[in-house]
Image (tube, helix red, strand yellow):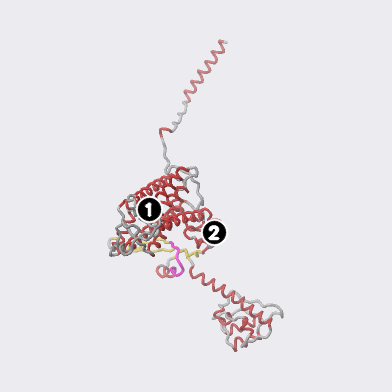
Amino acid sequence: MVRKPYYSPVAPAAGVTPTVRMNSGMSEVLDWTCTDVRRWLVANGFSQYAGIMADQHKIDGPALLLLKEHDLREQPLGIKCLGDIKRLFGAIEKLRKCSSGSRTASESLDDVLLYVEYNKRRRMSISGEDLFVTTKQNAIITDDEFVETLSNTGDFHSVRLISRDELIRTVESPDTPSKSLAKLTISFLYCLMSLLITAFVMVLVHDRVPDMKTYPPLPDIVLDNLPLIPWAFDMCELIGVALCLVWLTVLVFHKHRVVIMRRMFSLVGTVFLLRCITMLITSLSVPGVHLECRAKSYGSFQEKLIQAFHIWSKLGMSIQGVRTCGDYMFSGHTTAITLLNHFITEYTPPSWTTLHTGTWVMNLFGIFFILAGHEHYSIDVFIAFYISSRMFLYYHAYAYNHANLTATDDRIRLWFPLGWFFEAGSLGKVPNEFEMPFPIKYPMFSKSPTPPSSPSLSHKEGKEKSRKNSSKKKAC
């Protein structure tokens, strides 16, 4: 049974713009028939046009929403009264807005999330007998998944709708210790996955490295004027190891190490994922004639995974026996030492100028040694330094001002989804305070408590003092 729109037989007074009368139970305008359109016209004071529009020209709900002002003015409708044209078109516009609003509301419910608590039965076989164990489960699922889960398990405790605002409030709620650890775990897994993908892409690009005889090194203004230093690239990796040791020392003793590690993992994962794309889409020729690089196919997918694990486990370092070719755009070594330098200078006090100067000098010398070893083109190193430093600065600028940014513009959550997820509810700029990672007690320096005086001894001492005082008085 189709529910008809509400209408009133009383026409509006002349010169008054009619209002679109719709009750909460009316059917969708797109489902209206010609009869429904006729009733709507009568209800809104356009009974003189109901016959020509609904009966003669068969205008139903969808056709009514498509009408424009010139359709009312021109033939075949040809309404002559300008006031009627304006009022009728205004009523259709209001009807169109109401229809689009209800349609948007219904469409927005297609992708809702539900928080569901239900019982799940599992079969267990003990001594040849089947036992069923019921456990209480909870999950956040879509409405389509809810229907599928309902078909498998019908014993639900509760079903609660999770709105977009509730998700935003949950993510942006102040960080608790458990929430901070959960974010740290997610960022660590994200970084781990990113580095594994990077290692696998390095295996793929090694298969596609151009032949050195056919494609000689590209002209490079720095490499063409800088003589080859054979030990330079190993020296760059030793600088990276030194920076890593300094950073680990700072990280261990920093009071806010959990927040810093989360930012480090998310930044490293994002930058190296971007490096995967740049390595894969364009294969540059080998930059140095001293390098023995040729396309090498690792055959099956399993062999590629084994080689990728070898690169990942050795951190892609040549001093540990890793030799890769084709991974030029952009330099991973420059990315690593640049990020380490920025993390050390950001999370140590500004007064530690000696350390900051030393890390910057090591960063620049590391870049020089990469070029002196002819392991990368100059553009590889420049882009790596630029992207790494900009990503670090942009991420921390957002982390320090995320509350103001998201409060003024909701699009920030879409533009920086990773930063919003990890930094919403955090401290922002953390103070550079240091402490021991674990409380350490030194028994030899602790003060031993003084034993309480015995009441009998104190009584004897009091008697002796009174005797001495009495003897002094007699002498006087």
**Which image quadrant: the C terminus?**
top right
Q: Which mark is residue 226?
A: 1
Q: Nearer the viewer, residue 297 or 45?
A: 297
Q: CA distance from mark 1 to mark 2?
A: 48 Å
Q: Is residue 44 above or below residue 253?
A: below
Q: Is residue 360 above or below residue 30?
A: above
Q: Nearer the viewer, residue 282 or 305?
A: 282
Residue annotated with mark 2: 406
* Disc nearer the start of the sequence (1/2): 1
Q: For mark 2, does the 10 Å Cα neighbourhood hold few (<14), some (14 to 19), or many (20 or more) residues?
A: some
Mark 2, secondary structure of its residue: helix
Q: Which mark is residue 315?
A: none
Q: Which amino acid type is shown beneath numbered disc 2?
A: Thr
Can residue 190 be seen here? The reply is no
Residue 206: x and y in percent read 32, 61
Q: Nearer the viewer, residue 402 or 318?
A: 318
**Which image quadrant: the N terminus?**
bottom right
Boundaries of the magenta span = 138-146
Which residue, as the protein is rendered here, is positioned at the far bottom? 56
Which residue, as the protein is rendered here, is positioned at the far right? 14
Q: Which amino acid type is shown beneath numbered disc 1?
A: Leu
Q: Residue at x 54, y 56 (%)?
A: 403
Residue 253: x and y in percent read 43, 44
User: In the image, 101: left or right of 275?
Assistant: right
User: In the image, 404: left or right of 289?
Assistant: right
Can residue 305 be seen here? The reply is yes
